[in-house]
Image: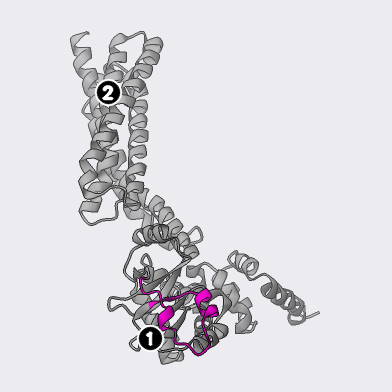
Amino acid sequence: MTTEAASKPIETIFRTYIKTDPRGAARALEQLKSAEAAQILATHPVRLIIPVFEQLIPHFSAEILDSLSPEIRSKILGGLPKRQAVRILRYMNEESRQRVFSLLTEKETKLLLQLLDYPPDTAGGIMDTQFVSVLLTATVQQTVQIIRKAQRKVVGYVYVIDEEGKLVGVISIRDLLLAKTHDLIEPLIHRDVRKVQAQNNREELALIIQESRFLALPVVDDEDHLVGVVRHEQAVRAIQKDILGDLSRMVGSDAEEHSLAPVSIVVKRRLPWLMVNLLTAFMAAAVVSLFEGIIAKVTALAVLLPIVAGQGGNTGAQALAIVIRGLALREILPGMVLRVLYKEMVAGAFNGFIIAIVTAGAVLLWSQSWVLSLVIGLAMVVNMVAAALAGASIPLILQKLGRDPAQSSSIFMTTVTDIVGFATFLGFAMIFFSIFK
């Protein structure tokens, strides 16, 4: 049996797999190299592989498309939901994008370019461009006909626009069904409609959806033109992605980095912050080097250093997480900053005092040195107060500077807790051991 003959049953099986389980087919393809995945998909009709592309990770989809012909590439992107197509286009270089646009209609290209202009973390970046809208002058019968032609998944609300495409209001399906066929829809319009601006970020969008509790919200541009809708599930996914992005940024990674991202991208995004972390580690080491003399005399200090730094790091991480969450949910308003810092400082002092008593008691039992117990107890209180203040203040400072509050904040916080912890512990040791030697 020839190789060509043997491959035909495999192609038949995979075609059945694509038809019945596009998501499973996508997960299987992601285990292959992009060129191999492209070779498999190129043997199938575009109508079958579009549902698979809807399930693929965007950056992997972009790699596969680069291996396909421009004609197939444009057909796939033209057939995908516009929101998904834009997510893939963001990972393509400008030359590849232009080749795609040259094969699409002018209307499709204009819409995709418009969506690409919206940052991915805004309402415009996650909105769906498929929705039901009717003109202000339409009748009930005309509106019902438009609804019947629309896809079932987009029929939730019927939005009313004027001749310029500006949002006028929304109509209830119930009101339409109860109205007479030839009546105009204008008396049925609810004009006090909750809407979001296309430039609203995810945090603002989350608050609006939480307050309104609608299944979807219309999205308008600066001139109040209706440009899309954000559905509840889209907003939830976007917020989840934002939270996971914050976790990545806190440790110096990147919000857009995926588990299957190429090594070159991973190195490019992580290495700069690893270098920053290395620099801060040298700073902490430099502080320790200032106290070489006392460490040489009291070797137990070297054993206990990680305890002081570790407790400070944990305290700072707790404050950091709470403040970043408060900023994300807009719980912390400008006038509340001092109140937040005071609360964290007091909490750090109370926790520090209790931990200091426990630590000092354990060190006393271990070393039989009340001086060493006193030193580590005092250092623990000071470092935990400093750590709580650092964890609370660093994201607030970053926000004040116009930066992302989560951007590598844990690296800066750890630097503060290490330096303060080492300096206070070894500094108190130098003072007290010189007095009570």
Residue 233, relative to residue 76: is it above or below? above
What residue do we see at 36% from left, 29% from top? 311
Q: Do the residues labelled 2 and 1 touch (CB within 8 Å)?
A: no
Residue 240 at x, y percent in the picture: 45, 56
Residue 412 at x, y percent in the picture: 28, 44
Residue 282 at x, y percent in the picture: 27, 39
What residue do we see at 55% from left, 79% from top? 177
Circle 1 sits in a helix, a strand or a loop, which is it? helix
Q: From the viewer's side, name the closer residue of 171 and 110.
A: 171
**Viewer can see residue 203:** yes
How many numbered marks appear? 2
Question: Which residue position is annotated with label 1?
Answer: 110
> At label 1, which amino acid type do we have?
Lys
Residue 391, relative to residue 400: is it above or below? above
Query: Which residues make up the magenta segment?
Result: 169-192
Query: Residue 434 — which label?
Result: none
Say if the magenta span includes residue 176. Answer: yes
**What separation in Å lies between label 2 and label 1 (alpha carbons)?**
62 Å
Please name which of the two marks, 2 or 1, marks the residue nearer to the observer. 1
Say if the magenta span includes residue 166. Answer: no
Residue 27, relative to residue 410: is it above or below? below
Residue 354: quarter of image? top left
Residue 252, relative to residue 59: is it above or below? above
Q: From the viewer's side, name the closer residue of 433 and 174.
A: 174
**Viewer can see residue 292:** no
Question: Which residue position is annotated with label 2?
Answer: 379
Q: In which quarter of the image is the N terminus?
A: bottom right
| Structure colour scheme | one colour
**Residue 108 in the figure: left or right of residue 405:** right
